[in-house]
Image: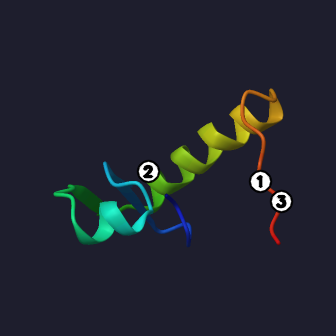
Amino acid sequence: MVADGEAVFTTSANLTDAALDRNIELGVLIRDRSLAASVTSHFQGLIDREALRPLPIE
């Protein structure tokens, strides 16, 4: 996950109640603008090639 262009958060957790409350999960937060830009660019490329489709915001 890149939310602010400044850090990357990668985790094994699903964003569910079970994952967040009952399971043992591991995540890492890396504060690196270059890495955040690279991850953002990678996912934008996947979206541009239609390998991924963004979900509509409701």
- Determine which quarter of the picture holds residue 41: top right
In the rendering, at what x and y percent does residue 32 appear?
A: 38, 61
Name, please, the residue furthest toward the left: 24
In the rendering, at what x and y percent does residue 11 appear?
A: 33, 53
Amino acid under disc 3: Pro
Residue 2 higher or lower than 46, as above or below: below
Q: Which residue is mark 1?
A: 55
Q: Which residue is mark 3?
A: 56
Badge 2 or badge 3: first in the primary sequence: 2
Q: Is residue 6 left or right of residue 13?
A: right
Q: Residues within 10 Å of mark 3 (few under 14, many from 20)?
A: few
Q: Which mark is residue 11?
A: none
Amino acid under disc 2: Leu
Q: Which residue is mark 2?
A: 35
In-front residue for pair 54/13: 13
Distance between the Cα atoms at labels 2 and 1?
24 Å
Quadrant including the C terminus: bottom right
Q: Residue at x 49, y 56 (%)?
A: 36
Q: Residue at x 20, y 55 (%)?
A: 26
In the rendering, at what x and y percent does residue 13 appear?
A: 33, 54
Amino acid under disc 1: Leu
In-front residue for pair 23/29: 23
Tags 3 and 1 in contact by the CB under 8 Å rule? yes
Distance between the Cα atoms at labels 2 and 3?
26 Å
Q: Is residue 36 left or right of residue 20?
A: right
In the rendering, at what x and y percent does residue 1 appear?
A: 49, 58
Q: Nearer the viewer, mark 2 or mark 3?
A: 3
Badge 2 or badge 1: first in the primary sequence: 2
Indicate the secondary structure of the residue bearing disc 3.
loop
Q: Is residue 57 left or right of residue 37?
A: right
